[in-house]
Amino acid sequence: MNFEPSNFIEDIIVKDLESGKHNLIYTRFPPEPNGYLHVGHSKSLCINFGIKEKFHGKCNLRFDDTNPTKEDVEYVESIKEDIKWLGFEWDKELYASDYFEQTYDFAVKLIEKGVAYVCDYNADQIRETRGTLKEPGQESPYRNRSVEENLRLFREMREGKYADGSKVLRAKIDMASPNMNMRDPVIYRILRAHHHRTGDKWCVYPMYDFAHPLGDALDGVTHSICTLEFEDHRPLYDWVCEQCEFENPPRQIEFARLNIKNTIMSKRYLKKLVENGNVDGWNDPRMPTLSGMRERGYPAPAVKEFCARVGVAKANGEVDPALLEFCVREYLNANADRAMVVEKPLKVVIDNMADDEEQLFSVVDNPNNENSGTHNVVLTKEIYIEETDFALVPPPKYKRLVEGGMIRLKGSYILKHVSTELDENGAPKLLHCEYIEDSAQGGVNAGIKVKGVVQWVSANKCVDCELYKYESLLVDATDEVTDFNDRLNPNSLEVVKGAKGELYLDEGEVGKSYQFMRVAYYKYAGKKDGVSRFYRIVSLKDTFNK
């Protein structure tokens, strides 16, 4: 089969297939269930599952659940939901804890080979004797314990005879290695914590750098794709596979992680926002989590397109969030139905219509979709237009309704201004207009030129709406303000109450996306107390520099 590679990872895979090194490509997505996935994880998902799809291979979902103090079933379920939302299917659902017994046996094997030992140093002592980038580390006084003593101590660690932190199992490699990760790294520690799957069976747990290569090798993974921060860990990954004597070990390949300007890419900090009440949970529409993006209304295909446009690189960089918004906007422009909503209603009375008169106008749901349907909007004597679409004293280049002027109602007639009623502050509270007969599409007066076209809704045939407008959780960093805590945006959410929408909005299911004409793209989030709530997905204005 002839595959055309599109990045350096696929170059490696194609060569491995062509050389006969592998007949089936096997990848995995290995999240730690200690939080919800964020947009940064979408790149890894797209790479690993994309390789599966392109090369007709396999991809497992394997949870790295080796740290029970931070992990929870809630996170496991949210991760699975996010992957399904993006449209990916894993071949096997696995857990590092599936291999705890085998992992322990491999640790015993390393002890028997003389390349692992039990050390009584605590975490501080290990750190203090690790050395620096310019100076070698100091060997532990426990480094040359006999194999028999190490086997006994490690067995007793498992049996619970020692306190947490009092002993660890370390790989015996090279305390003078220029790679700090090779200076006798800890591969097992004592930790009495309830595990979400194994309960209280274990009081010793493997470290990530030991469990991960073993999981990959035991699963038959051919290419272990990870981000650049693991590049310095690759020699240890290869060392574990070699010492555990796997015949066809996986190959670790690193790529640049996804960094987006003014976007929090740390599960630890995202968790802090949730715990501090800065947001309404992991799926708050302002959160850069995949569940938050889904709640806000981001389409999964747009997120995947974003990852494709970012590409796969070897060097870290920062992406403009406008690119993500561009992909979302591009998708919604082609797929979202159009509807009319008035954020700040100004009532208009059409004097030349009867009190009980109703006229229906057919509107195309989406003019960019050739298979789009239509829906009706109803025109009555009293309607609402946007407050800003009328001006007593128009600013320069104003192209909407003015006193004595004309404006077209979207999909309907041309209106001519007759008079204005003012409130006690001198602001317009009610407009009187007349419609020009036969000025709708196809009418003899349809060609009359007007300054602009505005959205509108019937005053007694409309839906009460609340609009939730979201902005970035972070403001730009400055020379003086760089910490996340000081950059939290106090205006990340604005709720507009009293908006009015056309009746068509009542027909949509929760989750349906719309383009509110001349306003923004919104998602229908359901009703509360008879009011329809809509979440702003993205503005109509495109700021991305193509």
Image: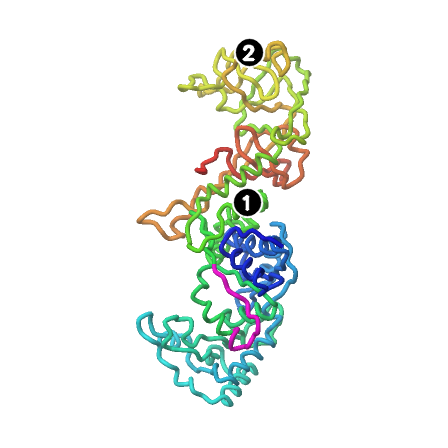
Whether residue 543 is in magenta: the answer is: no
| Residue in view at x 68 percent, y 16 percent | 357
| Residue in view at x 42 percent, y 54 percent | 316
Q: Is residue 122 above or below residue 513?
A: below
Q: Nearer the viewer, mark 1 or mark 2?
A: 1
How dense is the environment of label 1, judged by Cα within 10 Å: few (below 14), some, or many (20 and up)? some
Q: Which residues are magenta?
A: 241-254
Which residue is at the front of the view, 131 or 391? 131
Q: Which mark is residue 281?
A: none
Q: Which residue is mark 2?
A: 448
Residue type at mark 2 is: Ile
Whether residue 247 is in magenta: the answer is: yes
Residue 96: image quadrant is bottom right
How dense is the environment of label 2, judged by Cα within 10 Å: few (below 14), some, or many (20 and up)? few
Q: Check contact, mark 1 vs mark 2: CB within 8 A.
A: no
Q: Which mark is residue 305?
A: 1
Residue 195, x across and y down, in percent: 59, 70
First reached walking from the N terminus: tag 1 or tag 2? 1
Q: Quadrant of the C terminus?
A: top left
Residue type at mark 1 is: Glu
